[in-house]
Image (tube, grey):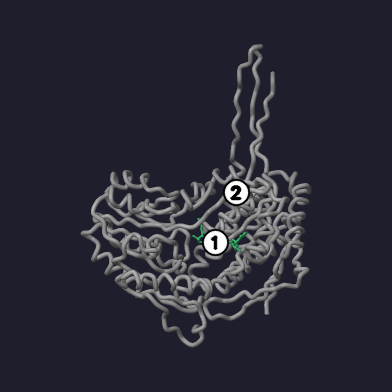
């Protein structure tokens, strides 16, 4: 049995309490590793190690030197590519094709991109006039914020964690990472890469455990941290914000969504189907940016539903290593129960089940896995919980619409505001509609096309702040203004 330990001050450590929990492969229910849960003692040690690192060589290291080390981390991940792919697939059950095209290469790129970016960021300066005629110069210096607590989810474990750790380290901070209890593997493997790359001890620390009354809460309440970056559910965001308020620690939040796709009758239907297939079913529907509501202009409605149904029914479920497989399980039995409870609500609310709606028949070796059928509904009212609440599963509801004004109001009628996709060949319409959608990210004729220099984050209850490109610097560093009287 593999042992997954905490990583503190450059060393792999067990927890003093001796408490462990199982890491389960959701494809077949097998326990793949025993994880050592961090208690208050380990979290204290990790935060102390990170603070010590800020006062050690890391805190005074030249930017160019730091960037070289981060490049080594990126190279180190790629050098152990197959191990990372295996670790991610065992923890999540996701197909190898997905982990090897998205999770791991993007995870490595997150170190490279932010290292390149930080090298080239100017700061502002202003000359001011003064009554004595001599004036003064102001210039800003950018400093690391300090110790950043990174709390990560399970859906894209390495990618979303390094999306925070990359810019945090590039800006000169030290981090304490709390990976999801469902996916502890790749954060721990990354610790080995950090040591191999020569990242000084205490700069990257990992504490394993759960949220309340466990490592997540101990970390986010800790007085020794200087910022919290969190990706996960909106209600967890509320709990973390309360914790952060005690020490007035700044937060950066990437939260839940109930994202819509809008398909106009003039859309290129092949592209719209291909994009919507990905946005609904990629990673078994467990992508924060994924689509759970589809609005199709009435003349195209029947054809769109028919073609999305054909697409859903052609998905191939199975074991992650099988090259033909493009659809995995959901993350856990608990999450499967949540998704299936919405399948039940849809039935009770009178949905027309276009396809799916239940649990698939799997071969004996996968019968203990957390599998659910890809599912499409039509015919629900907008007030159904299925249309209002985030399900985070491989499913969507499709509804017809008749006008631009109507669809804009349907898309915006939610407390969430993360992402949207608009499909149309009419350029003026695209420019007209996209800015009216209350979301942080809107794609036109695409989905999940990401330039890492662009702002990333959610509006309304989908997030606080923007990460990505220079925007992340607002959170991961602090500006001091120096005013010099001449
Ligand atoms: P989650 O909120 O249950 O857990 C996320 C992390 O928070 C885990 O590490 C968990 O242990 C920790 N945690 C839970 N309670 C805590 C507490 N009280 N204090 C401190 N830490 C706590 O989310 P999840 O189920 O892992 O991920 C799925 C959710 O994440 C979905 O809602 C999805 O939309 C969202 N998400 C958002 C984005 C985005 O960019 N906006 C990206 C990916 C996922």
**Residue farthest to the left?**
299
**Residue farthest to the top?**
132
Residue occupying the point 54% across, 44% down: 471
Q: Which mark is residue 210?
A: none
Q: CA distance from mark 2 to mark 1?
A: 27 Å
Image: 228 above or below 479: below
- Note whether residue 450 is visible: yes
Q: Quadrant of the C terminus?
A: top right
Residue occupying the point 74% across, 53% down: 50
Q: Residues within 10 Å of mark 1 (few under 14, many from 20)?
A: some
Q: Quadrant of residue 134?
A: top right
Disc number lying in front (2 or 1): 2
Tell me where residue 283 appears, x and y as whole percent.
47, 67
Q: Nearer the viewer, residue 271 or 353?
A: 353
Residue occupying the point 73% across, 55% down: 47
Q: Quadrant of the N terminus?
A: bottom right
**Residue farthest to the bottom?**
364
Image: 127 above or below 226: above
Q: Nearer the viewer, residue 343 or 199?
A: 343
Q: Residues within 10 Å of mark 2 (few under 14, many from 20)?
A: many
Q: Nearer the viewer, residue 227 or 50?
A: 227
Residue occupying the point 35% across, 72% down: 348
Mark 1: C-beta under 8 Å from nearest atom of ligand 1: no
Q: Secondary structure at mark 2?
A: strand
Which residue in the protein does label 1 denote? 105
Tell me where residue 452 appears, x and y as whole percent.
51, 51
Q: Earlier in the sequence, mark 2 or mark 1?
A: 1
Tell me where residue 25 appears, x and y as whole percent.
57, 76
For residue 349, side relative to residue 57 (left or right): left
Q: Secondary structure at mark 1?
A: helix
Which residue in the protein does label 2 denote? 251
């Amino acid at each position: 049995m593999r042992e997954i330990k905490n990583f503190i001050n450059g060393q792999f450590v067990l927890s003093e309490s001796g408490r462990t929990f199982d890491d389960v492969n959701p494809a077949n229910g097998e326990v793949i590793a025993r994880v050592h849960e961090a208690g208050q003692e380990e979290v204290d040690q990790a935060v102390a190690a990170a603070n010590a690192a800020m006062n050690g060589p890391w805190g005074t290291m030249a930017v160019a030197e730091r960037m070289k080390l981060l490049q080594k981390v990126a190279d180190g991940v790629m050098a152990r590519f197959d191990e990372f792919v295996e670790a991610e697939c065992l923890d999540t059950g996701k197909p190898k094709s997905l982990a090897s095209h998205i999770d791991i290469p993007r995870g490595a790129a997150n170190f490279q991109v932010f290292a390149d970016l930080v090298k080239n960021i100017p700061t502002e300066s202003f000359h001011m006039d003064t009554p004595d005629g001599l004036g003064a110069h102001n210039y800003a210096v950018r400093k690391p914020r300090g110790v950043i607590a990174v709390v990560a989810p399970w859906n894209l474990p390495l990618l979303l964690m390094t999306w925070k750790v990359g810019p945090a380290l590039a800006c000169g901070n030290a981090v304490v990472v709390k990976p999801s209890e469902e996916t502890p593997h790749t954060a721990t493997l990354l610790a080995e890469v950090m040591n191999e790359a020569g990242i000084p001890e205490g700069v990257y620390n990992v504490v394993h455990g759960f949220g309340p009354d466990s490592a997540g809460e101990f970390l986010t309440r800790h007085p020794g941290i200087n910022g919290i970056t969190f990706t996960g559910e909106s209600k967890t965001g509320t709990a973390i914000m309360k914790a952060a308020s005690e020490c007035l620690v700044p937060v950066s939040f990437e939260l839940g969504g109930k994202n819509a796709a809008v398909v106009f009758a003039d859309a290129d239907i092949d592209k719209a189907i291909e994009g919507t297939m990905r946005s609904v079913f990629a990673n078994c529907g467990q992508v924060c940016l994924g689509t759970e509501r589809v609005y199709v202009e009435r003349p195209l409605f029947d054809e769109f539903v028919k073609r999305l149904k054909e697409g859903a029914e052609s998905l191939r479920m199975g074991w992650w290593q099988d090259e033909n497989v493009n659809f995995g399980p959901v993350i856990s039995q608990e999450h499967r129960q949540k998704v299936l409870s919405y399948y039940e609500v849809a039935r009770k609310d009178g949905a027309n089940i276009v396809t799916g709606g239940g649990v698939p028949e799997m071969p004996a070796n996968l019968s203990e896995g957390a599998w659910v059928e890809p599912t499409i509904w039509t015919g629900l009212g907008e007030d159904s919980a299925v249309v209002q609440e985030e399900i985070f599963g491989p499913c969507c509801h499709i509804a017809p619409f008749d006008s631009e004004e109507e669809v804009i109001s349907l898309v915006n009628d939610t407390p969430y505001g993360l992402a949207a996709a608009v499909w149309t060949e009419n350029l003026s319409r695209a420019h007209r509609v996209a800015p009216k959608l209350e979301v942080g990210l809107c794609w036109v004729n695409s989905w999940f096309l990401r330039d890492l220099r662009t702002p990333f984050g959610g509006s309304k209850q989908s997030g606080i702040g923007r990460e990505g490109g220079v925007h992340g610097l607002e959170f991961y560093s602090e500006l001091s203004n120096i005013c010099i009287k001449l």
